Image (tube, grey):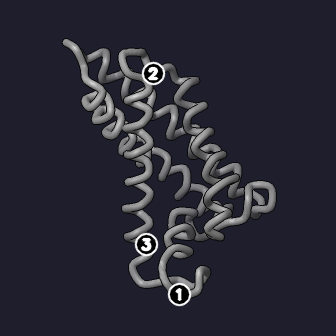
Amino acid sequence: MTRTLLSEAARGAAGGALATAAMSTVMVAGDRAGLMPDQPPKRIVRSLLPGHRHQPKPGEGLLATVAHFGFGIASGALFGALARRRRARVPLGIAYGLAIWLVSYAGWVPKVAALPPIHRDRPGRPAVMAAGHVVYGTALACALNRWDRRR
């Protein structure tokens, strides 16, 4: 069966949703361990909503969850489209997850003043977020590979 770019992106999007859920467990564990109060997605949404960028805002938790999953799904769709017709190797998934982390947390996230750059962030949060992105990439590649085996 020939798969189209759109079907590969859709598979990647589904994998991105699963991978984001897996990543979220790492983030919750980091929060509970006291390594990162205020989840990064919440800080990002807070900084983009009207008002003072560091003041909590109504509805930010729900918006942060929607934004986090939306970004993870979109990133998964891109990975699915790029990995088209090839087995998604786990090391490639890990590299993809870490690339997302670096581009985000060393790039645009500090630019919107949601969090400081990685090298100036509070101890613990960069390690938790890097680990979360490793889990994201691993889960994304594994989901795509599992679905390929079922065909």
Q: Residue 141 placed where, x, y %?
A: 45, 28
Residue 49 placement, left or right of 95: left
Secondary structure of the residue carrying tag 2 is loop
Q: Amino acid at mark 1?
A: Gly
At 57% from the left and 46% from the top, the residue drawn is: 132
Q: Amino acid at mark 3?
A: Gly
Q: Choose the circle earlier in sequence order: 2 or 1.
A: 1
Q: In the rendered structure, which disc, 3 or 2, sits on the residue that comes first in sequence?
A: 3
Position of 31 relative to 101 (above/below): below
Which residue is denoted by mark 2 in the rendering? 88
Residue at x 50% of width, y 40% of height = 136
Give the x, y percent position of residue 116: 72, 65
**Going 38% across and 54% down the picture, which residue do you hit?**
70
Residue 64 percent across, percent down from the top left: 44, 66
Q: Check disc 2: other Cα within 10 Å, few if <14, some if 14-19, many if 20+.
A: many
Q: Mark 3 sits on what residue?
A: 61
Secondary structure, mark 3, is helix
Residue 128 visible in the current orientation: yes
As helix, strand or loop, the secondary structure at mark 1 comes to loop
| Residue topped by disc 1 | 51
| Cβ atoms under marks 3 and 1 closer than 8 Å | no
Quadrant that contains the N terminus: top left
Q: Residue at x 43, y 52 (%)?
A: 71
Q: At which x and y percent is residue 46?
A: 52, 75
The answer to which image quadrant residue 3 occupies is top left
The span from disc 3 to disc 2 (Cα, nearest Å) is: 32 Å
Q: CA distance from mark 3 to mark 1?
A: 16 Å
Frontmost residue, 95 versus 37: 95
